[in-house]
């Protein structure tokens, strides 16, 4: 009975997250359609990679004919923050939580689900995450499929307008932390400028977009970590 109650609490808290995911993934489906994916392929791509930035990198890499190795690396780099989130959540588990339970929770770690999970008092019950995942992941996947289907018959202007929503989502992710931290604001600005410059440099411009993104992500983040490391008190929070 306790597991059922906790599951329903997670399901309840996951409903608004799932509705938000549905709207965003619909726009993501437009990108998937442009990459040549059908509705079924888009559904499974979203189901097994529940990450907006990660999937955007995935679909654009496919569209630019990147190699399997490039796609795997760029997806890993873009989604690397989930490794840190998973490590943080693992500290809230009861010692009785087994490996299989932890793996299922790790499957559905997203920014929003991490937020509601970490905000719960006391030890984390895996069934709470199961409930949130049970509603959020299907809506995310269905939204992608419907976006692909809609992109096949909607007018080109409407499809283009829907695609803008994804860029709006990225701006919503970037702007708040950039306003709070000058280091992040500088890093974002430099990344935009460097990405453009890389399309002009004689040798670098011959690389695929995925490879350039990997190089810039590692290089800029490494420089920021060396020059502006997080204060010790922030790291320990």
Image (cartoon, helix red, strand yellow):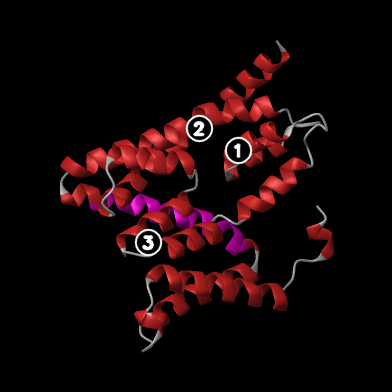
Position of the N terminus, as image quadrant, is top right
Q: Secondary structure at mark 1?
A: helix
Magenta span contains residue 178 = yes
Counting every numbered tag in the picture gives 3
Q: Secondary structure at mark 3?
A: helix
Upstream in sequence: badge 2 or badge 3: 3
Magenta span contains residue 231 = no
Residue 43 at x, y = what percent?
37, 38
Is disc 1 surrounded by few (<14), some (14 to 19) or many (20+) residues within 10 Å? Answer: many
**Cβ atoms under marks 1 and 2 closer than 8 Å:** yes
The residue shown at (26%, 53%) is 34
Q: Residue 61 shows which numbered tag?
A: 3
Magenta: main secondary structure equals: helix
Q: CA distance from mark 1 to mark 3?
A: 26 Å
The residue shown at (72%, 48%) is 87
Q: CA distance from mark 2 to mark 3?
A: 25 Å
Q: CA distance from mark 1 to mark 2?
A: 9 Å
Residue under label 1, please give it.
113
**Cβ atoms under marks 1 and 3 closer than 8 Å:** no
- Mark 1, mark 3: which one is toward the viewer? 3
Name the residue at the top extreme: 1
Residue interval drawn in magenta: 160-179
Residue under label 2, please give it.
136
236 w.r.t. 222: above or below: above
């Amino acid at each position: 009975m306790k597991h059922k109650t906790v599951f329903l609490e997670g399901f309840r808290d996951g409903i608004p997250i799932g509705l938000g995911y549905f709207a965003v993934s619909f726009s993501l489906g437009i990108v998937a359609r442009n990459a040549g994916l059908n509705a079924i392929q888009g559904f499974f791509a979203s189901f097994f990679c529940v990450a907006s930035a990660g999937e955007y990198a995935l679909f654009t890499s496919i569209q630019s004919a990147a190699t399997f190795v490039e796609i795997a690396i760029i997806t890993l780099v873009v989604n690397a923050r989930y490794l840190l989130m998973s490590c943080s959540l693992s500290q809230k588990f009861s010692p009785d939580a087994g490996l299989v339970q932890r793996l299922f929770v790790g499957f559905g770690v997203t920014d929003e689900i991490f937020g509601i999970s970490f905000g719960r008092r006391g030890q984390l019950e895996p069934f709470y995450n199961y409930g949130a995942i049970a509603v959020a992941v299907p809506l995310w996947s269905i939204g992608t499929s419907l976006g692909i289907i809609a992109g096949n018959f909607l007018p080109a202007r409407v499809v283009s307008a829907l695609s803008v929503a994804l860029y709006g989502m990225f701006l919503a992710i970037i702007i708040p932390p950039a306003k709070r931290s000058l280091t992040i604001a500088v890093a974002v600005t430099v990344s935009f400028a460097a990405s453009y410059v890389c399309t002009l440099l004689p040798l670098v411009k011959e690389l695929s977009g995925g490879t350039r993104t990997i190089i810039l992500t590692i290089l800029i983040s490494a420089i920021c970590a060396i020059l502006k490391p997080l204060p010790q008190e922030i790291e320990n929070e």
